[in-house]
Image (cartoon, rainbow, N blue to C red):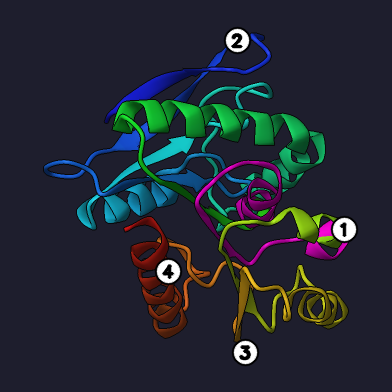
Amino acid sequence: MSTMTIDALDESGSFSAYVARPEGSPRAGIIVIQEIFGVNEGIRQKCEDFAREGYLAVAPDLFWRLGPGIELDADVPEEMQQAFDLFGKFDQDQGIADIESTIQTVRAELGGGKVGAVGFCLGGRLAYMTAARTDIDASVGYYAVGIDGLLGEKHAIAKPLLLHIPVADHFVSPEVQAKMHEGLDDHPKVTLYDYPGEDHGFAAELGKRRSEAAAQLADQRTADFFAEHLG
């Protein structure tokens, strides 16, 4: 298992990131942003999938300040509760700073070149924040939570952003989804895709949450999006 160590921007320490490398020279870099379950097997699998498509894929351990190396299973109720507890303690602004340092590290590894980000759940929210607060080249968020509270930052999104929205998401109400569409449908850099009947976590690589047909559709749209905007 390949990892790299990344220094925090505030010099408070360093954290680990899982790395999947393509055969040959990378076409670009992609930062894979974890769910509330840490950099677990499913997130590592996402990295491997992107590496097979020719990208240098890196998943930073964003929970390192709470405890390095956390890996949880969404199908285990006790671990789901632990994940919610971590979500409550997690400093999202520090998380974005750690993503920023990851962007810089990946760009240096590539010798320049484009870097994208893709996140799931909490990571979907962070992907939106990354689009608004960093110079990432393209971002994708799956079942992002709480975007209605971040719409005030939409003016800062200068590079392409794609959001996958499961319509039956039990963590994102129809009212919140309506606000997302109202706030973002006319944004020239933002694309929203709705998935009727699908719930939160539908594109998880592993476990009971996965909905195969919708996951494949969303992942193909993501692949096409990155191919267009990262090269």
Residue 45: percent from the left, percent from the top? 34, 51
First reached walking from the N terminus: tag 4 or tag 2? 2
Element on which disc 4 rests:
helix
Q: Residue at coordinates 46% horizontally, 76% vertically from top-left?
A: 218
Specify the label residue 152 is tagged with. Answer: 1
Name the residue nearer the viewer: 141 or 152: 152
Q: Taking the image as drawn, is residue 91 in sight? A: no
Q: Which of the 4 quarters of the picture holds residue 157?
A: bottom right
Name the residue nearer the viewer: 74 or 128: 128
First reached walking from the N terminus: tag 2 or tag 1? 2
Judge the density around disc 3: few (<14), some (14-19), many (≥20) Cα neighbours within 10 Å.
few
Which amino acid, by three-letter code, is at mark 1? Gly
Q: Which residues are magenta?
A: 123-150
The residue where tag 4 is placed is: 225
Query: What is the distance, in whole Å, between disc 1 and disc 4 at their CAs?
Result: 25 Å
Query: What is the distance, in whole Å, between disc 2 and disc 3 at their CAs?
Result: 43 Å
The residue where tag 2 is placed is: 13
Which amino acid, by three-letter code, is at mark 3? Gly
First reached walking from the N terminus: tag 3 or tag 4? 3
First reached walking from the N terminus: tag 1 or tag 4? 1
Which amino acid, by three-letter code, is at mark 4? Phe
